[in-house]
Each structure stands twice: as structure tokens, then as C-alpha cells.
Image (cartoon, rainbow, N blue to C red):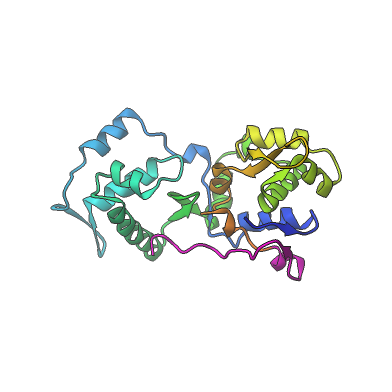
Amino acid sequence: MRRHTCSSGILPRCLARVQGAEHPLTPPPDAWRATPTPGCRRLLRTAPATNASVKETGKHVRSDELSRLEAALFLAREPLTTRRLAKLARLSDGTRARTLLRELRGLHDASGSAFRVEHIAGGFQLLTRSAFGPWLRRLGEQPPGNRISTAAMETLAIVAYRQPVTRAEIESIRGVGCEEMLRQLMERDLVAIGGRAEDLGRPHVYVTSRRFLTVFGLARIEDLPPMETLSGGPATTDTDAAGPGDDPTA
């Protein structure tokens, strides 16, 4: 796990960059994430299981397998693994799901779709592109639960870049108490207790959650931007920072 030594002010800017214009996607509001109803699940179960029939969409021939995969992604409220997608879309296996994910991603990119298949939190999810963020925000106010204070963001950033980290270490970096901030972050399922340190008293250590990866659009924690890109020079690390992981659909 990467561990950085850097001023706490740098850390929130690193997380802000992940959610900024450089990241290609922004998660849609909850209202735009359909909840699978019994009827929707029934449609997925009764969808044709073969590729004998195809649908002509412009110049692209869309198979029933691809349509079922896209339907499963559209209905999902969280990232789905290839194995889970294969089961929902009635595909042969995860390898077939991965092949169709590449095809679907290419189709969305080529057609200029408002949506794109993104690999985040160890799975795949259909998200809106960042260019449509301002327009989507005009459709409805962002739920209060998705907002986070500056103090909480700073605490979250320290956990993200220093994990596993104790509360005492976080407070040493911030210079103020952080018990309340940690409680709020845990309530929002962005931070979790990752065990106990070997220090005196064996205090809890904190780590980011799977939902943190989903919210920030990351496939894994190593995909966080390196701090040297923001601090103007290389940051001190205990180990070399790993680069972004290979795209599993490639």
C-alpha cells in the first residue's frame, strides 16, 4: 500500500482532481439509477438466450447478448463483476462478458453516447460522461448525503493516501481532532475500520471502503493520482506508487 509524506493541504486537491474535469465520468444522481423492479428482473430472465436474432441500429448490429448485458448495467446501482454480469445477462462465462463489455464501450464511444462503461471498484458500471454533469445538476438538487465538508474531505484524503492509518496519525497531520469526521465518513460508508495497529494499546486503523472507489470512479486505490503531480515535486513514499491498473476489458 502506498504511503506518502506530504502536507495535508495537498491531499484534498488530489481527491478533487479525481472528481474534476480530468476524470471522464461523473456518477448520475440516484434518481437516474434505476432500481430493478420484479418486472425488470423478469424481463432479464425471459430475454432470448441465443444470438439468433439481432437488432439493426444504424450501422451496428446489436446482439441479444449485448442488449441483455447493457440492460443489466443500466439497472445496477453498483459496479458489477464480470461473473455477476454473466449470470444476470445469461452469458456463458465472465470471459464472454468481458468481450461484450469491450464491444459495448466501443459502441458508446463511437456513437457519442452520453453514457460510458467504466471499470470502478473491481466491477463495471454504466455512468454519464462529465460533460453532462452541469445539465444533470439542473434537473434536480444533489442529495445532501452526497455532500462532504472541507474538514471531512481532508480527513478522507489522509485516509486514502496514508491507509492503513490510526486516528492519532490523522490528527497529527491535520493538527486537530478528527473523531467526528471519521464517524461521519464511516456513516457514509467511505471509510472503514481495517483492523488494529501493533502500537501500544492496539488502536484501530482506518482504510477506505469499496464505496469510496465507486464514488471517486476508481478501479483500485492505486489509481489515485500521485501527489507529486500537484505538489510540484516528488512526494516521499515508503514504496513506489503503482500506476493505474490494466483495463480488464482490454
Does any portion of residue 214 appear in the rendered image? yes
Q: Residue 192 lies in what quarter of the image?
A: top right
In the image, residue 236 lies in the stretch drawn in magenta = yes
* Quadrant, the C terminus: bottom left
x, y (%) of residue 164?
A: 67, 47
Residue lying farthest to the left in this orientation: 52
Q: Nearer the viewer, residue 234 or 51?
A: 234
Quick one: quadrant of the N terminus?
Answer: bottom right
Task: Determine the residue located farthest toward the top in the rendered image.
Answer: 38
**Number of marks drawn:** 0
The residue under the point 38% across, 46% down is 73
Residue range of the region highlighted in magenta in the rendering: 227-250
Residue 31 to residue 25: above or below: above
For the point 20% across and 37% down, the residue is 46
Side of 210 where 240 appears, left or right: right
Residue 249: x percent and y percent? Answer: 38, 60
Q: Where is residue 41 in the image (x, y as percent from the top left)?
A: 30, 34
**Residue 111 at x, y percent in the picture:** 37, 63
Residue 245 falls within the magenta-colored stretch: yes
The residue closer to the viewer here, 113 or 102, is 102
Q: Is residue 161 above or below residue 37?
A: below
